Amino acid sequence: MLLLTVDEQSLEPIYRQIVAQIRDKIAGRVLLPGERLPSTRRLADQLGIHRSTVATAYQELWALGFIDLSPGSRPRVRDRMQFATAADRGDKGLVDWQTVVSPASEAVWRTYRRLDPLGKESTPALINFASMNMDSRLFPLESFRACLDRAVKNHGDALLGYGARAGFPPLREYIARRLQSHGISVTADEILITNGSQQGIDLVFRMIAAPGKTVAIESPTYDYVLPLLRFYGLRPVEIPIRQGGMDLGALAAAIAQERPVLVYTMPTFQNPTGISTGQAHRERLLSLCEQHRIPILEDGFEEEMKYSGRVVLPIKSMDKRQLVIYCGTFSKVLFPGARVGWLAAEKECVERLVAIHRFSELAPSMILQAAIHEFCQSGHYDRHIGRMHRAYRKRMQTAVRALSRHIDPAWAEWTEPSGGFLIWLKLKPAPHPPPDWKTLLAAHGVEATTGGSFFYGETPDTYLRLSISPLNEEEITEGVRRLAAALRQAHHPD
């Protein structure tokens, strides 16, 4: 006899109580495959409930694959596959993914494992100069929360649909007006909202991708660009960075020999070097690309973060021939969770990018974009930029002073940036075999990004990129002191 109980006082419907008990008995091997269950009439009489309740329970068990139902026959326990448990699955599945994925996907995965090891979290004891995350202590949480509430209240259910393909129209209009303050003359129709600047770069690469095409890039360059180029089959042509920016003589030679279809550049607070190019350099770069009709992807990810020296306008501000695609973001000033960036380009180019965007992401988040628009329109964004400038001006000054005080010029050299969050150290050769820098730094309680990941090819020199974005002045000072101790050990191990 199948022994079941029902509780008529429970909030759980009676048919679900029956389903749960029979499932438990099957899982516990009390009921074995092939065993018959009572008829609906018999079980209903046994439990003192209506026959239709039992029938509903049996239908649910059939739908879940636990029993077989046949007209005129009693239900039978089904011989079914058991649900896999964590212990059943183990660490390795049946599929050898390396043989299934494309070579490009495999290369990207291996790069990801190297740059962002799975499960890796920065140890709290380490002072982290490797992270590009913003300092969460500076996030404008309360004012952004209020703007999010107002955006939902003002726009209501209009934010719950797919919305405009190119992004929230009022935000595109705001960005177009703001870019005009940077000398960039664009309309809202020439703006595409993206999921951060990284997606903007990805969309441009996808638009031009074809086997055998080349892209001219700075060397070193933003490390997350290199895996994308490999994935899309685009061949990077590395152009060395000098003190004033990309070596334009080397670029001219590369154009003549390699015929790149795009030049990717970060002229302001370049990642990883922190270098900003001057007006004359930007004019010569634009003129060279105009001469050969090569589009420029200008990455302005830290454009707003200049807090010393004269402002140099973006290359896009001089672009009379619609050659430049300008990429910007709110993430590096507001907070990284605000995955909202933009591309500004000729209208036809934007339309092509919208089409590509449409088939990989049906629509962007209208709610988040509306909240950011409200934040900007209310004046919060400009006030937040002011606070960020004051905070990071002091932090960068603190970092430069600490480097000058603690780092022997015989160990490393660097250039003080005029903004942004990055300092690029070129390490002097140690008189002994080079250490494993990651291990040596960790032993001294500090973490930094080694320079090899920012080059497509090999580099004979050793670099460290220091990011001050997540650290306050006290942490920066202590971190540089620990870095100096590691460099001292590398040069004087005894």
Image (tube, grey):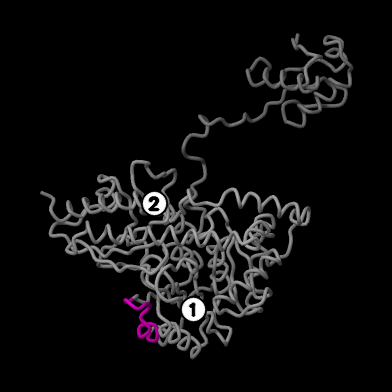
**Residue at the disc numbered 1:** 313
| Amino acid under disc 1 | Leu
**Residue 302, relative to residue 157: is it above or below?**
below
| Amino acid under disc 2 | Asn
Residue 192 position, x and y percent, is: 64, 69
The image quarter containing residue 183 is bottom right
Residue at screen point 66% across, 79% down: 348
The image quarter containing residue 453 is bottom left
Identify which residue, 338 or 181, lies in the foreground: 181
Residue 117 lies left or right of residue 462; in this view the side is right
Mark 1: give few (<14), some (14-19) or many (20+) Cα within 10 Å: some
Identify which residue, 385 or 27, lies in the foreground: 385
Residue 76 position, x and y percent, is: 76, 22
Identify which residue, 490 or 395, lies in the foreground: 395
The answer for how far apart the CA atoms under marks 2 and 1 are is 29 Å
* Residue sitting farthest toward the bottom: 291
Magenta highlight on residue 118: no
Instruction: Give the residues drawn in magenta, as a range.
Output: 242-253
Q: Secondary structure at mark 1?
A: loop
Identify which residue, 298 or 223, lies in the foreground: 298
Residue 157 position, x and y percent, is: 78, 53
Residue at screen point 37% across, 77% down: 245
Instruction: Say which mark, if any, is on residue 425.
Output: none
**Residue 59, relative to residue 37: is it above or below?**
below
Residue 459 lies left or right of residue 158; in this view the side is left
Q: Secondary structure at mark 2?
A: loop
Residue at screen point 32% across, 64% down: 424
Residue 190 position, x and y percent, is: 65, 75
Mark 2: give few (<14), some (14-19) or many (20+) Cα within 10 Å: some
**Residue at the disc numbered 2:** 472
Magenta highlight on residue 250: yes
Q: Earlier in the sequence, mark 2 or mark 1?
A: 1
